[in-house]
Image (spheres, grey):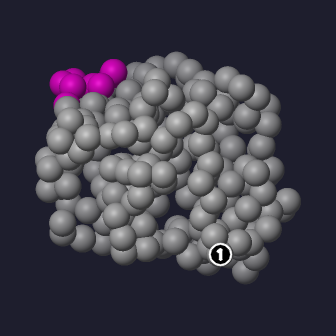
């Protein structure tokens, strides 16, 4: 799996790296709604669809053959913990622009995950240079509990936006709040503004 770049998330160069209301931890708590799914990597696919010229569907080997990058970032969970100095490896979200032609009317990315879970991002947030569809964390394959085989990582927003077990990216012209956003969480989720709840 080739690595072509190392990207440092801007939050990692702040003088104060832990946002208001957060506490630093060296652990990586396992938090999710429902059970951990059993995912067969031979059957996994990433579907890129919606407002695109031509839909794409990638198998895991096809996904892993694409040029990958590394992202160094911090993680901030809405429950109040922050884990600093994480190293992710995977496909930069911006690389999706090379896989599909996104139609001009697209304004949002709805990220789909196992169990009909979704989370919503503006295209500006989704295509930040440090957003990555990650397969590895700190040099190791991401565990099933943390999103194997592929999880989204959006370092600048609370970690619920970094959906586990992703299966698709849908481009839309209208915003559609995802699972947690529909259950009282903030639609955007900036930890530095404490955008925890709507």
Residue plotted at (52% across, 71% down): 86
Q: Is residue 161 above or below residue 84?
A: above
The number of callouts visible is 1
Residue topped by disc 1: 26
Q: How far from the left and from the top, in percent, is residue 19?
A: 77, 64
Residue 55 in the magenta stretch? The answer is: yes
Foreground residue among 130 and 36: 36
Residue 71 in the magenta stretch? The answer is: no
Q: Residue furthest right?
A: 21
Q: Secondary structure at mark 1?
A: loop
Q: How far from the left and from the top, in percent, is residue 111?
A: 45, 34
Left or right of residue 155: residue 169: left
Q: How far from the left and from the top, in percent, is residue 17?
A: 71, 73
Q: How far from the left and from the top, in percent, is residue 155?
A: 56, 58
Residue plotted at (76% across, 76% down): 16
Foreground residue among 103 and 180: 180
Query: Which stretch did the figure color magenta?
Result: 49-56
Quadrant of the frame with the C terminus: top right
Where is residue 132, by image quadrant? bottom left
Q: Is residue 102 above or below residue 38?
A: above
Residue plotted at (73% across, 62% down): 81
Q: Is residue 25 above or below residue 195?
A: below
Where is residue 58, by image quadrant? top left
Q: Is residue 55 above or below residue 42?
A: above
Left or right of residue 198: residue 61: left
């Amino acid at each position: 799996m080739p690595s072509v770049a190392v990207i440092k998330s801007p939050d990692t160069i702040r003088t104060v790296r832990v946002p208001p209301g957060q506490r630093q931890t060296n652990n990586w708590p396992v938090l999710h709604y429902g059970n951990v799914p059993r995912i067969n990597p031979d059957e996994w696919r990433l579907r890129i669809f919606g407002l695109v010229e031509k839909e794409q569907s990638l198998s895991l080997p096809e996904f892993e053959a694409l040029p990958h990058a590394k992202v160094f970032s911090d993680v901030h969970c809405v429950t109040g913990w922050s884990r600093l100095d994480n190293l992710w490896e995977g496909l930069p979200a911006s690389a999706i622009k090379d896989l599909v032609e996104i139609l001009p009317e697209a304004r949002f990315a709805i990220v789909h995950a196992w169990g009909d879970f979704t989370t919503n991002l503006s295209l500006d947030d989704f295509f930040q240079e440090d957003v990555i569809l990650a397969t590895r964390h700190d040099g190791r394959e991401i565990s099933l509990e943390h999103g194997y085989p592929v999880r989204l990582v959006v370092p600048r927003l609370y970690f619920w936006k970094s959906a586990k077990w992703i299966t698709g990216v849908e481009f839309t012209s209208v915003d559609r709040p995802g699972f947690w956003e529909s259950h009282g969480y903030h639609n955007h989720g900036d930890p530095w503004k404490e955008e925890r709840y709507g």
